[in-house]
């Protein structure tokens, strides 16, 4: 995708295993907020403990405001609402990697 190497996982536990295998290559976690077994926020917290420098982008079909107000995500978390286009995903990924805040 746009020159990035992408590793995929079906759930949070698998994502942690993928991270352990490729930790020197992974700079960004893109995760759905709501996932079975382990939610995206929990996954992000665990990865941040392993690598405080990792960037995180959450996505969801719920609105950002609803998720933040519901306590699922911290205010200011990078977020992309579904549905999105490939170009809007690519733009948001670049913003997150560059440390740009548009919330």
Image (spheres, rainbow, N blue to C red):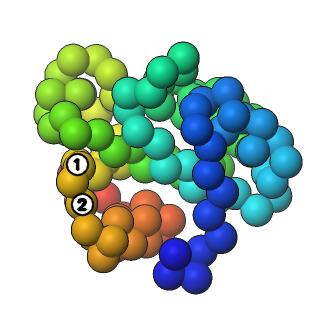
Q: Measuring 22% from the left and 48% from the top, which residue is drawn there?
A: 81
Residue 48 visible, this angle = no
- Left or right: where does residue 54 sit relative to residue 31? right
The x and y percentages for residue 1 are 52, 75
Numbered label attached to residue 81: 1
- Determine the residue located farthest toward the front in the rendered image: 10
Evaluate if marks 1 and 2 touch, with contact meaning CB atoms under 8 Å apart: yes
Numbered label attached to residue 84: 2
Q: Relative to 89, does residue 69 appear above or below in the rendering?
A: above
- Left or right: where does residue 59 sit relative to residue 5? left
Q: Nearer the viewer, residue 96 or 4?
A: 4
Q: Relative to 37, does residue 95 appear above or below in the rendering?
A: below
Secondary structure beneath dot 2 equals loop
Q: Measuring 43% from the left and 65% from the top, which residue is drawn there?
A: 93
Q: Nearer the viewer, residue 3 or 98?
A: 3
Q: Label 1, label 2: how many angstroms apart (C-alpha)?
A: 7 Å
The x and y percentages for residue 9 are 62, 43
Secondary structure beneath dot 1 equals strand
Q: Relative to 85, does residue 82 appear above or below in the rendering?
A: above
- Determine the residue located farthest toward the bottom in the rendered image: 3
Q: How many marks?
A: 2
- Left or right: where does residue 67 sit relative to residue 6? left
Q: Measuring 50% from the left and 65% from the top, which residue is drawn there?
A: 97
The x and y percentages for residue 51 are 71, 42
Q: Relative to 24, does residue 17 appear above or below in the rendering?
A: above
Numbered label attached to residue 1: none
- Left or right: where does residue 66 sit relative to residue 28? left
- The 10 Å Cα crowd at callout 1, few under 14, some 14 to 19, many 20 or more, is some
The x and y percentages for residue 7 are 66, 57
């Amino acid at each position: 995708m746009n020159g990035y190497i992408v590793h995929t996982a079906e759930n949070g536990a698998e994502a942690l295993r993928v991270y352990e295998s490729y930790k020197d290559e992974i700079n960004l976690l893109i995760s759905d907020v709501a996932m079975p077994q382990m939610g995206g926020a929990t996954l992000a917290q665990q990865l941040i403990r392993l690598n405080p420098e990792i960037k995180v982008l959450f996505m969801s079909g719920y609105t950002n405001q609803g998720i933040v107000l519901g306590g699922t995500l911290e205010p200011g978390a990078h977020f992309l609402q579904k549905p999105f286009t490939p170009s809007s995903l690519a733009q948001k990924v670049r913003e997150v990697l560059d440390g740009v805040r548009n919330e």
